[in-house]
Amino acid sequence: MLQIDRIHQYYGGSHILRGVSLQARAGEITVVLGRNGVGKTTLLKALMGLVPVRSGQILLDGVAITQASPYERARAGIGYVPQGREIFARLTVHENLLMGQATKKAGTPLAPQLFELFPVLEQMLNRRGGDLSGGQQQQLAIARALASSPRLLVLDEPTEGIQPNIIKDIGRVLKKLAREGLDGQPMAVLLVEQYYDFAEELADQYLVMERGEVVASGPGAEMQARGIRQLVAI
Amino acid sequence: MWVWAGAARALTPQEALTLAEGETADRIAVMGRLATSGDPQAEALIRAMAREAVMVRGEQVLIVEGETAIDAVTGAPASAEGATSAMVNNRLRGALERALAGLDLLGDDARRQREAALRLRDSLIAQPDASVMPWIENALASQNVSRLDGRARRAVEEARAALWLEGGDAAQRVTAVQTLAHVGQDSVRARLAQRQEQESDPAVKAALAQALAQVDRALIRAQVVGQLFTGVSLGSILLLAALGLAITYGLMGVINMAHGELIMIGAYATYVVQGLFRQYLPGAFEWYLLAALPVAFLAAALVGAVMERGVIRWLYGRPLETLLATWGLSLILMQGVRSVFGAQNVAVESPGWMSGGVVVMGDLTLPWNRIVIIGFALAVLVAVALLIGRTRLGLFVRGVTQNRPIAACMGVNTARVDTYAFALGSGIAGLAGVALSQVGNVGPDLGQSYIIDSFMVVVLGGVGQLAGTVYAALGLGLLNKFIEGWAGAVLAKIAVLVFIIVFIQKRPQGIFALKGRQA
Amino acid sequence: MTPDLMEAGAQRLARAHGIPATGQTEAGGRSAPFARPVKTGEVDTTHGRILYLEDVHVSFDGFKAINGLNLDIAPGELRCIIGPNGAGKTTMMDIITGKTRPDRGTVFFGSTIDLLHYSEPEIAALGIGRKFQKPTVFEELSVFENLELALAADKRVWSSLRFSLTGEQKDRLAEVLHTIHLSDALTRRAGDLSHGQKQWLEIGMLLMQEPKLLLLDEPVAGMTDEETERTAELFLRLKGRHSLMVVEHDMHFIRAISEKVTVLCDGSVLAEGTLDQVQADERVIEVYLGR
Amino acid sequence: NTPIKVGVLHSLSGTMAISETVLKDTVLMAVEEINAKGGVLGRKLEAVVVDPASNWPLFAERARQLLTKDKVAAVFGCWTSVSRKSVLPVFEELNGLLFYPVQYEGEEMSPNVFYTGAAPNQQAIPAVEYLMSADGGSAKRFVLLGTDYVYPRTTNKILRAFLKSKGIPDSDIMEEYTPFGHSDYQSIIARIKQFSSQGKKTAVVSTINGDSNVPFYRELGNQGLKATDVPVVAFSVGEEELRGVDTRPLVGHLAAWNYFMSLKNPVNDEFTKKWAAYAKAKNIPGHKDRPLTNDPMEATYIGIHMWKQAVEKAKSTDVDKVRVAMRGQTFKAPNGFEAKMDEKNHHLHKPVFIGEVRADGQFNVVWKTKGPVRAQPWSPFIEGNDKKPDTPQKSA
Amino acid sequence: MTATTTTTPIVLWPAKGPLLTRSGWGAVIAALLGVCALAPVLNLWVPVDSPWHLSDYMIGLLGKIMCYAICALAMDLIWGYTGILSLGHGLFFALGGYVMGMYLMRQIGTDGVYGSELPDFMVFLDWKALPWHWALSDSFAATLLLIVLVPGGLAFAFGYFAFRSRIKGVYFSIITQALTFAAMLLFFRNETGLGGNNGFTDFKRILGVPLATPETRMVLFVITGLTLLVFYLWASWLVRSKFGRVLQAIRDAESRVMFCGYDPLPYKLTIWVISAVMCAVAGALYVPQVGIINPSEMSPANSIEIAIWTAVGGRASLIGPIIGAFVVNGAKSVLTVHFPEYWLYFLGGLFIAVTLFMPQGLVGVARTVLQRMRGQAGGVA
Ligand SMILES: Nc1ncnc2c1ncn2[C@@H]1O[C@H](COP(=O)(O)OP(=O)(O)OP(=O)(O)O)[C@@H](O)[C@H]1O
Ligand SMILES: Nc1ncnc2c1ncn2[C@@H]1O[C@H](COP(=O)(O)OP(=O)(O)OP(=O)(O)O)[C@@H](O)[C@H]1O
Ligand SMILES: NC(N)=O
Ligand SMILES: [Mg+2]
Ligand SMILES: [Mg+2]
């Protein structure tokens, strides 16, 4: 579904992404691991079109979206959960979710599954997003991305600040989403994660990044065997 | 005043000429005679004088209507070639008005009758003139009763009361006092107070004391209502001026120093529409303002959209730089208008239905233009509130202005939403321009006089808080007018500014501070 | 008016009239000779508590975020706080640091300093440092300058005008830089750091402040396992000399550092004890850990 | 045979541009006219136009530049008194020559300025006298309403003293000021209504500054205060100011000036025609469709022509010589009279006209002085002015 | 920290630069020479018809712009470095100017139009004695003191309450604007006793020396230039001290500053008062040079302009605002003469161009250009 082909990216003078390539397939969870500052977030931002790439290509279902603007990518079916939540602080929870389905027709009701996943959001529907606790905001950010029924779901450290039982829930949800999506269609999930156990449990495919490069990749089942935990830790 | 004479007498050329050209005193004397003559020709001439449609050509007095002229004495068509206008000064104009009042009172147009009666009453309250008494009695006499409707009749009775108050017997005076007590006007109060000093009859004195108290109450009521009205009216103007800014600045965070110029563009659009109507649709001129509304909205919105596309979109997230750029834009827009329309003010006429006012509670006049603007401000406010709070576009605007990149990642075409939002704010400024063109100057500096007030209103209300903007506008309007009532306009303005400074100390985020963590 | 409100009012009045608040900081009720701002190191912990919260309540528009919270922390203790999202952990820190005023309740630093009477900078000067849930650093300043600003020193205007680093302070700076792995990033703009690096920088700033009590809101969020481990080591080293209150959702991390864990739920304490104890608590499993 | 430079110091931007821009064009028109007739002393005139942008210190800077860098022979400029006060020291220091074309409060007489606008006794006092006459309505009670600055303050001070001398008690005078740019006259008009309802005939004397007049008159019309009830006589409202107003409800209100566009005489016919043609030729916005002339334009026009005559008489553009030659100069002015520069006091002798507003925005002259009136820049109604010399003194 | 840490690693300290770089000092010395030596020589001793002559007009213009440059510098301290946008700095400028103006009015003595001890405007508005607030206007020493104390005191009081109430951002900007607007209206009133709309003008002498001589003007010019230089050096020192860094930290994250144990109030207040006083001194130097002070200096637009000079030059670089003041005002002076009808288009265009293409202001552009040149030079070498 998603194919990223040798992209390079710079912040000013510093070379952040150095020819990163990856693939994410529908029905699978692709996990990107790596230490702080190796460029994981930057990779996702490049994927979303929030930062320009110097060279390389991004293809979605074989169509190049490298030059597309962020909203066109969203409309092409990418849902994004940014690092640091980035919810709309002064919009209510409800309005945040409506923003999430901006790609849908006006007046589409919110999918009830969202509240099954995150019941707390239903209780706080009219509270301002900025007033939520950190973890609640994180849940909102995930729900918001799901609200657009994306074909490719991109998550940047979604477990950050979330209580353990909900992390478990999220894990289950992601697995389910990958297999059958919100509406029965399999979905591609691209997950950036530092929480190794969580990553290992979910990964169908994994990549490890270091200093802007992919240094290891493979099927999730082999992670333990290949000592990825140690690789990330060094 | 002259005494009513029933017999008709024909207008002579000499009289006509004196009326048109003589010494003021002679003209007034002649007019007095003519007004009571009952001659339709004379009445026509007097009415023409009041319209300033009389010209003199040699010895011939003409009544001119547009291209055609008739001889005032014979009624025959005549040529106005080389004729000069008969001049009217205030003294004569006053006499003419009185004469017209007399004519109207006995005419059969009920509306004119009513106006004439009121005018007569007011002038007699101000200056009682006993010589008019027979005439009043005549007007009230039985054969005329059917001709006066209730309101007009009451006014004539009040006029009679004003005369009785000075010249009547004790019983008449008491009736007069009671009648006049219902007329809650300053002039009545002055007249009653004057009477009280001279009055010796105890019954009249008691009635006077009671009446004075009654008038005072009415006056105070009227004063309070008047002050509230002026306050609300000023508030509505502040609100209109600020609403657009509440979007471009309050929501979008653009410190839009060119906001005033967008208002100005709205006002100039009104001016242009007015010109077009005058030229191409003179019949519908009364309604040109309605056409001006969409034109002004679109004109300002278009300029706003161009500003946004050309300049502002590169500056999101750098609010202080928008200050610099929009300041530059405002200089350019102002000078642009100077180059196109000239540096002087242009004339924007109010249509008839917005001129004048409605008299309530004695002599408190609420001008129509103010009333219309209050209603208009309300309508715009409701529209904006619904648009921002209830529509998807409104939601997108709010979302985009809070976090542009993430909104884009949600699939919102942020560039377009930004342009729409800015154009909307600008268009509303344009609407404000239409309204402001009806109360003040339309000139290149128009915007400068509103920009500071607009920012004060938006900020005092709490940035991004529409409700706050409304409260702030009304609050400042009322406060300003209240203080102006006892301290004068200059000190009131200073006091309001000091109030803003002090108020912000108490509420550092404006009236409607954003509560909670994100404040 | 409740008695404690009257008391609070009286103290506020006293402060408004410039009656020295320092009296409270002196152990044993001795009055301070001069009206000077309180200094770190003068916290009275003779009753075995450095932080003491009793019956604290806060509500936002009717929503009870903190609801009868009782908590105390001993000097040198490393206390872990866990609890579901929205339990009120961050709000509790807001209260301790003066950012949020409770509706009622008592918050004492040591046994004599009533924190409710101090402003945020005063509380910081008293010796309470805080790391926010969302990393906040001075984005336009360099890493070095960020740390230098946080350095424990006289923070009044006049002193800053005349300030220059002493050798000793330089050593401390270098040490902290090393601890937070940012020695190479010394001159970089803090705003350009990655999320995790900012987390570290913020911890570094806290260390520079040498607070008595550190409040750490999700310090390892967004860190890799290895970095998490290093953070755990660091905290264990700090323990004893400093008191720490750590909020985290990362159970491995908690396990690595914890002696005593408090579980907050719906604004009050649900359970308290060792990690094993609370992990075994059915209620905790129900609302927090999951099965 | 180089051209003679003259400076034009009128604001073309900022708040005063509304009034001043047209005076710049008037100077340019006069220059063109003079050049067409062969110039002065056989040399052409060249106007140096600068924009002091309604900024008073900038006026001084520009004045210095005109006098020292451009070396102009004379400067035509300024509108507000404060701009004149700002440039005055420069003109005195560098011995320049300024022609000031606007009615003002007096209390000044500089050897380096020729005042071609009215002093208070050439405008304000005759106007009030008219209001007190039978034809003017025999007013007994007065509202002195103005913008809060020096010209209205001083004028009203003079008027108060004058009214006192006519037996009007203080209780029958109401004085009110509004800030610059004031645009909400609701309360003030309500108060005027109240003041006027006390039985005595009341009149309003308005020294409201240009910008506030439109809102003022609009409110006046809408609140139904008619000229026959409470006439308003204004000193800063001319044809140009009324351009922005619907004058139908204002018919009968008054203005006092030394010139009206509607005056019928050959000189004025020529003047207005010339202006119309010039405005059309130069595409002057506003005026090309609806040319208007007004008093300060006339004063400007008189000023430049008198200066030309004086230069010819002095056979030099030297300021000291021109100054002497200016004294007693006469010029057939568009107001139909022969304007004369006083032998001593640097002010013009001017006739005074009272005009009533017509529905078309022009004025009907309803009263005028028999002939030109000599200016009294030192008003006798201000204490101590009787000792003032009647010739300009360079300030020490 | 604890001793358990292993060896302290060697850290390369960021070189704590000197107050100014070598070229910076060079520029300062050049400016010093220009103001104190070159300008007087070219103006006073080089003959008028020489092409090297510096006209009185230019001296006046430059003197005026240097005063504006001081304002821009002051604005930069409070806005560029502390993140507090004042839209009321024109008020402090005007107050300084008014204090000086009062002294200059008194220096007129009995040479005024009415030959009275009182200033002329008081005479014709029937004031019989000097009002109380003129009490010290006779003394030059008191005037110098008041130039600092009056605006400084006002800034202190206003700033104290505003900062104590934690008024920030645009709210602060708006109340400063309200303050200067209110003051303007107050000074417009004739009852205020400060000359109303006309303000003060027609000054004759200062310290007994006539004002309208080239020599006096030159002295004022030199004093202004020196003041600008001294303020520049002082500001450089301020922003490089830890105090300056705290200010920048306040700008970036005020609440974090508080959690670091700093009370932002005294910091903000100190820089606010310093900035206000700088403006006041500029105003006091401005008045004798331009010869007029009146309330329009307090108009909100004037204060906004100060911010604009700063932004055009480049915020948070001390030289930028000075350059900005020179460029904008120089452009204004040239354009109003050569393009009286079109200059606003140019000026407006300049503001837009600066924001769009030079986000760091003119200084930013200069910096990039310099860097490029250096880079190229480096590449070649
Ligand atoms: N706006 C920026 N300008 C310059 N450098 C930046 C910017 N944003 C990030 N960087 C740098 O780019 C590198 C990669 O950052 P990125 O945020 O992608 O890291 P990451 O892998 O997501 O780290 P983390 O796990 O901490 O979130 C880091 O070294 C960071 O300092
Ligand atoms: N200003 C506010 N207005 C309304 N509700 C608020 C406000 N501040 C906090 N809350 C609510 O109070 C509750 C406690 O929030 P808090 O941030 O303290 O939780 P937390 O324990 O830190 O959670 P997390 O682990 O997710 O960070 C949440 O439900 C939150 O939505
Ligand atoms: N001189 C005037 N009208 O200011
Ligand atoms: Mg990241
Ligand atoms: Mg939290």
Image: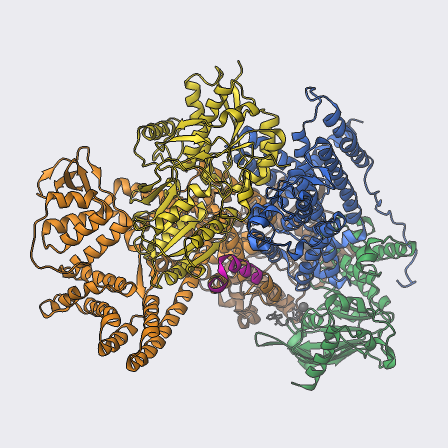
Chain colours: A brown, B orange, C green, D yellow, E blue
Q: Is residue B486 magenta?
A: yes
Magenta span: predominant SS is helix
First to last magenta residue range: B483-500
Spot occupied by residue B470 in the image (x, y as percentages of width and height): 47, 62
**Front residue of E178 and E318:** E178
Q: How many dots with numbers?
A: 0
State which quarter of the image contains the C terminus of chain B. Answer: bottom right
**Residue beneath the point at 32% across and 45% down:** D357
Asked if A91 appears above or below B281 in the picture, the reply is below
> Image height check: is B226 above or below D115?
below
x%, y% of residue A76? 51, 50
Q: Is residue C126 visible?
A: yes
Q: Residue furthest top?
A: D1
Image quadrant of residue C77? bottom right
Q: Is residue D395 magenta?
A: no
Using residue B340 as the reference point, say whether residue C37 is left or right of it.
right
Tell me residue E207's x, y (percent). 74, 42
Residue C143 percent location from the top left of the image: 78, 52
Ligand 5 located in image quadrant = bottom right
Quarter of the N terminus of chain B within the rendering: bottom left
Nearer to the camera, A110 or D276: D276
Closest to the observer: C235 or D360? Answer: D360
Q: Note whether residue D301 is visible.
A: no
